[in-house]
């Protein structure tokens, strides 16, 4: 199989635009066609200079055919839009092509991929999820180095065979500086509920609670933030994250996320009931152990 | 009143040692005597080169007299140790001196200061609290720039009069690059429960929960942290904080802290019950507003 010479990226926000920049930095010299419905993101993506073209995308069949002409199609949108694009693209793709995505949950996407991309006449589908991002999205925030050192999770529908487009895409992911890791889709959604979705909801809950508590205060939430310093800044940073993306996570990973939230509520209650007992020491000791573990490389 | 030429710093951990370094950088050329019971912190503090001397401190009356000879005494220990040192030092201080502290809660310290340092024959007492720190303490982590841009809260027992040692100390705080802000002690403890103590307990609870969930996992908490990336790192960073310091906060600010914890538990429950409803949009919108507020300078 010839190396891919044409990549379509659907969604030129932070992740899609950063993939384009990172591919260029890693030496990809083929065509990178960007597609986005937002005029602002299209303009910002154009300015990056990494895309060969950046086009308005509608939901028409023409658009789908144009996107599907690429050797590799990257769906870089929130999860529900990934699901929509999978439906539109499946009939237009052809054998030897690859469709991959960057959605935050993988169970629903993997199930739909198994249903839509099973035929040998269609492109292959490789569900993916880079563990990188920023609380503020948009192509204007894109960086070639966004994925360097980050884990890039994949939940393949079948073993990845050397020499295929899927194997080629994983090679590119490594050249972007990311570390591929393979998981079962349900295990992915469970672990991501703990390490990504729970921290997000927690940070949103804390920021929303502080806003409601201090917005009417004479000092205001700006004074409160000045007092809080780095600890407050870091624990509420994800509070800036957009609903549009996280709604889809909440809708497609509801039960695992609800379970982690309930566990945290109970843990906070335990801590609250033990502010004056030696149990508090145990909580700090356990938390200290978590932080002493060295993230594997 | 002549400018202060001798400062005693009781506790040569992160904050005490950083104050010594910052005073030197800001041009203080007098004596800075450090006192600590930990041999490791004494050795690390000596190496910084900012202290004139670093001595083992016991709880003897001799020690208290030696500390109290300074023009300005800075109590840079956890809150309960601050309270102990106030009792020991009060009888040894003299008019014209100043004792100040950096304790994380201010109501109990301010009440005790009013009782112990009321006499005109004694030193003045200025309760203080720099909103700066790191999750890992110790003199080895000290930095001259730790307080730059940070808010330094004071809860004075009486208005600060120009020309006094208290006014002189506040001048030094500004020269260290910090921004002094004055508050009522109860208001201090309430606002710090929200912006400092709650984020700490939350981060400890999340890290402890993840440790208990994944420590027995084949992948382990190190793999989990590699997957989680920056969002997880920032929301659990304070999980490394030492129990020794936070026990005193929990003991001296129990009710305000318990109230914030309960409020957060309820907020998380509300979010959990609305993962699939438009209420979730409201939570994100409110959190977005908090983060859009610009911390005042």
Image (tube, coloured by chain):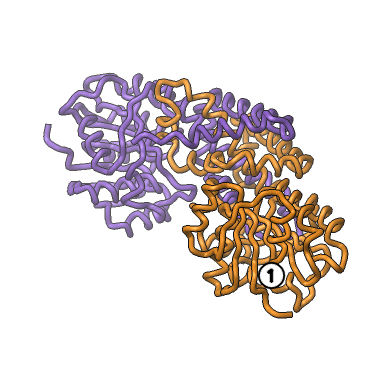
Chain colours: A orange, B purple
Q: Quadrant of the C terminus of chain B?
A: top left
Provide residue B37's location: percent of width, then percent of height: 41, 47
Instruction: Pick whichever, A135 or B7, lies toward us.
Output: A135
Res. A281 in view: no
As drawn, is A227 to the left or to the right of B99?
A: right
Q: Is residue B160 visible?
A: yes
Q: Decide: is B108 above or below B288.
A: above
Specify whether A178 is left or right of B172.
right
Quadrant of the image occupied by residue B221: bottom right
Decide: few, some or many residues near mark 1? Use Cα within 10 Å; few <14, some 14-19, many ≥20: many
Up the image or down, A203 lies above or below A86; here it is above
Could you tell me which residue is drawn at 20 percent across and 26 percent down?
A: B95
Is residue A282 or residue B168 the one in the foreground?
Answer: B168
Residue linked to disc 1: A170
Most distant residue in the front direction: A62
Residue B161 image offset from top left, x and y in percent: 20, 23
| Up-down relation of residue A60 to residue B269 (above or below) | below
Determine whether, in the image, residue A210 is placed left or right of residue B181.
Answer: right
Counting every numbered tag in the picture gives 1
- Please give the chain letter of the residue carrying mark 1: A
Task: Pinpoint residue A89: horizontal percent, then vertical percent.
Answer: 76, 57
The local secondary structure at tag 1 comes to: helix
Please, is residue A135 above or below residue A162 in the view? above
Percent x, y for residue A190? Answer: 76, 49
């Amino acid at each position: 199989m010839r190396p891919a010479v044409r990549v379509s990226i659907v969604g030129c926000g932070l992740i899609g635009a950063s993939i384009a920049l990172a591919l260029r930095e890693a030496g990809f010299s083929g065509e990178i066609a960007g597609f986005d419905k937002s005029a602002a993101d299209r303009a910002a993506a154009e300015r990056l200079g990494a895309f060969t073209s950046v086009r308005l995308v509608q939901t028409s069949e023409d658009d789908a055919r144009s996107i599907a002409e690429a050797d590799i199609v990257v769906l870089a949108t929130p999860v529900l839009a990934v699901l929509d694009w999978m439906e539109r693209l499946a009939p237009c793709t052809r054998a030897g092509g690859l469709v991959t995505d960057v959605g935050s949950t993988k169970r629903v996407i993997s199930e739909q991929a198994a249903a839509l991309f099973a035929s040998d006449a269609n492109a292959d589908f490789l569900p993916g999820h880079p563990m990188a991002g920023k609380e503020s999205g948009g192509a204007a925030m894109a960086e070639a180095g966004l994925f360097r050192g980050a884990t890039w999770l994949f939940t393949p529908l079948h073993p990845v065979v050397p020499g295929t487009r899927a194997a080629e895409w994983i090679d590119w992911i490594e050249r972007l500086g990311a570390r591929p890791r393979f998981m079962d889709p349900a295990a992915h959604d469970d672990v991501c509920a703990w390490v990504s979705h729970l921290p997000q909801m927690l940070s949103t809950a804390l920021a929303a609670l502080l806003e409601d508590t201090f917005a009417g205060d004479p000092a205001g939430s700006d004074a409160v933030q000045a007092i809080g310093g780095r600890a407050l800044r870091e624990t509420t940073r994800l509070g800036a994250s957009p609903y549009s993306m996280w709604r889809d996570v909440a809708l497609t990973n509801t039960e695992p996320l609800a379970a982690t939230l309930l566990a945290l509520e109970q843990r906070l209650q335990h801590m609250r009931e033990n502010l004056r007992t030696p149990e508090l020491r145990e909580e700090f000791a356990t938390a200290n152990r978590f932080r002493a573990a060295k993230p594997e490389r």
